[in-house]
Image (tube, rainbow, N blue to C red):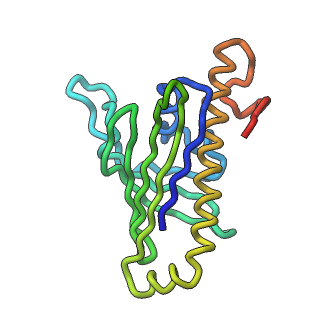
């Protein structure tokens, strides 16, 4: 199962990147996430400041899936700062890989996510065969919802900086065109 969704965002790439890497505020910015527990943080740079790389970051994310609370522990496996980062999670007989990215295509900025789930056990393979289509549809909705939240928050920050209100994008969502 593979999913790749990206959305155009009317905000600079550094603004978008800062939102998709701000794990301390995911609960505030991503409506589908109900809790984030940071388990390990990336090591500090040699000068004692926060590293631009997310390597070493590990967290448990809590969200509602299929009407019930789901907790997944994820960790960053690869990161090119201000471009993309990849994560891995293992749960319920499957491995889940995702890639969050920002990109500029001919002056248009995008945020996107690639997601792949691969069953490892016989039970996991059977479940994917039997109900995988429901899981794919649910994951597409989750990914799209998360990206819409990133778009809303990023565009809200730009609007606030320009004096148009909106703050972090949570208090005012005007002019969204999909």
Q: Residue furthest front?
A: 106
Closer to the camera in the image, 80 or 41: 80
Across and down, in percent, residue 20 comes to 50, 39
Q: Is residue 65 left or right of residue 95?
A: right
State the residue at coordinates (65%, 50%): 145
Q: Quick check: 149 above or below 109?
A: below
Q: Quadrant where the C terminus lies?
A: top right
Q: Residue furthest left?
A: 46
State the residue at coordinates (63%, 66%): 137
State the residue at coordinates (56%, 85%): 130
Residue 73 is drawn in which quadrant? bottom left
Across and down, in percent, residue 162 comes to 67, 13
Closer to the camera in the image, 81 or 49: 81
Q: Is residue 122 left or right of residue 144?
A: left
Residue 168 is drawn in which quadrant? top right
State the residue at coordinates (69%, 24%): 167
Across and down, in percent, residue 62 comes to 56, 58
Q: How many marks?
A: 0
Closer to the camera in the image, 10 or 24: 10
Closer to the camera in the image, 50 or 126: 126
Across and down, in percent, residue 138 comes to 63, 65
């Amino acid at each position: 199962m593979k999913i790749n969704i990206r959305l155009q965002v009317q905000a600079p790439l550094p603004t978008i990147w800062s939102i998709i890497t701000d794990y301390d505020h995911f609960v505030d910015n991503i409506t589908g996430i109900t809790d984030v527990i940071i388990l390990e943080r990336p090591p500090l740079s040699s000068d004692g400041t926060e590293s631009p790389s997310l390597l070493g970051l590990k967290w448990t994310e809590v969200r509602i899936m299929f009407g019930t609370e789901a907790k997944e522990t994820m960790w960053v496996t690869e990161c090119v700062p201000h471009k993309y980062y990849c994560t891995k999670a293992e749960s319920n007989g499957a491995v889940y890989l995702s890639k969050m990215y920002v990109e500029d295509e001919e002056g248009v900025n995008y945020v996107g996510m690639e997601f792949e789930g691969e069953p490892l056990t016989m039970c996991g393979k059977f479940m994917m065969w039997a109900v995988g289509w429901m899981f794919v549809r649910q994951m597409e909705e989750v990914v799209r919802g998360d990206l819409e939240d990133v778009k809303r928050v990023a565009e809200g920050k730009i609007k606030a900086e320009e004096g148009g209100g909106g703050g972090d994008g949570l208090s005012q969502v005007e002019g969204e065109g999909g």
